[in-house]
Image (tube, rainbow, N blue to C red):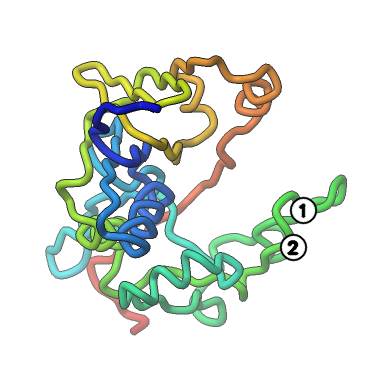
Amino acid sequence: MYSGNFDYDIIIVGAGISGLAAAHAIREKDSNISFLVLEGNDRIGGRVHSTLLKAGKNRVLPFDTGGQFICEQQIHLMQLLRKLNIVTEENVNDYGFTLGDFNEGQFYKTDSMPPIFGETIHAEDIIQFLGKNTAPEICDKIAAAIGITNIKTNTAVEAIQRNEFYVLVRTAESEYKCQYVILAVAPEHMMNILFYPPLTDAKITLYRRMHYKECVKYVITYREVPFL
């Protein structure tokens, strides 16, 4: 039996919304469990991010240029948003001008194979973050709830070594001994981490074949808003 000390009970790799949600679940389950979230980028949020753009009345406002849509089928995420008192608004599709159409209004459609992740998602099923909250602000609220001191950015994980007693997580400048590790990074980023024991060939093949879905997003701002 291992008689040494752990730096943390749990290390979470990745401070995107999945990693932050995992940390929130741990804190909610037992506040005595110690954890640390390690993020390689200089910000939290992962694929959730915003860009400052010029808007009306000589303002500069943040606009979501990363992930911003959710739907009721994402049960756990919706529950978390309600716990944090984050208000969402339904996506509006019945007014204004149509800039373009995609697959007859469907966000996912294929004739060659069935949908990979459940049913086809239609535009009317989508909920959009609107109003005062941008998607990164949601991540900020989760981070505040779990404690910002429990998150380290600019700290990419380089190696994870596991034995029968503990897990050792190595970064460029530090190493952390813990009982468990939660990997909350995209599969393609998983390949940048050295694992010991090594990952199985089946997992390596799976991670290499999994890629981001591509999306084109248009953000239009106006000096004046004549249609409101």
- Residue 13 appears in which quarter of the rendering? top left
Please determine whether, in this image, residue 150 is positioned above or below residue 204: below
Please determine whether, in this image, residue 118 is positioned above or below residue 172: below
Which residue is label 2 attached to?
Answer: 119
- Given residues 186 and 93, the one toward you in this image is 186
Which residue of the protein is positioned furthest toward the left in this rendering?
58
What amino acid type should be assigned to the residue bearing mark 2? Glu
Q: Position of residue 223 (x, y in %)?
A: 23, 66
- Residue 198 appears in which quarter of the rendering? top right
Which residue is label 1 attached to?
Answer: 115
Q: Which residue is found at the position 50% from the left and 78% from the top?
A: 92
Judged from the image, the secondary structure of the residue bearing numbered disc 1 is loop
Total numbered labels placed on residues in the image: 2
Judged from the image, the secondary structure of the residue bearing numbered disc 2 is loop
- Given residues 113 and 3, the one toward you in this image is 3
Q: Position of residue 54 (x, y in %)?
A: 21, 56
Q: Is residue 203 left or right of residue 75?
A: right
Q: Position of residue 19 (x, y in %)?
A: 39, 47
Whole-number angstrom distance, CA of label 1 to CA of label 2: 6 Å
In the rendered structure, are the residues bearing label 1 and label 2 in contact, judged by CB atoms less than 8 Å apart? Answer: yes
Q: Which residue is found at the position 41% from the left and 68% from the top?
A: 80
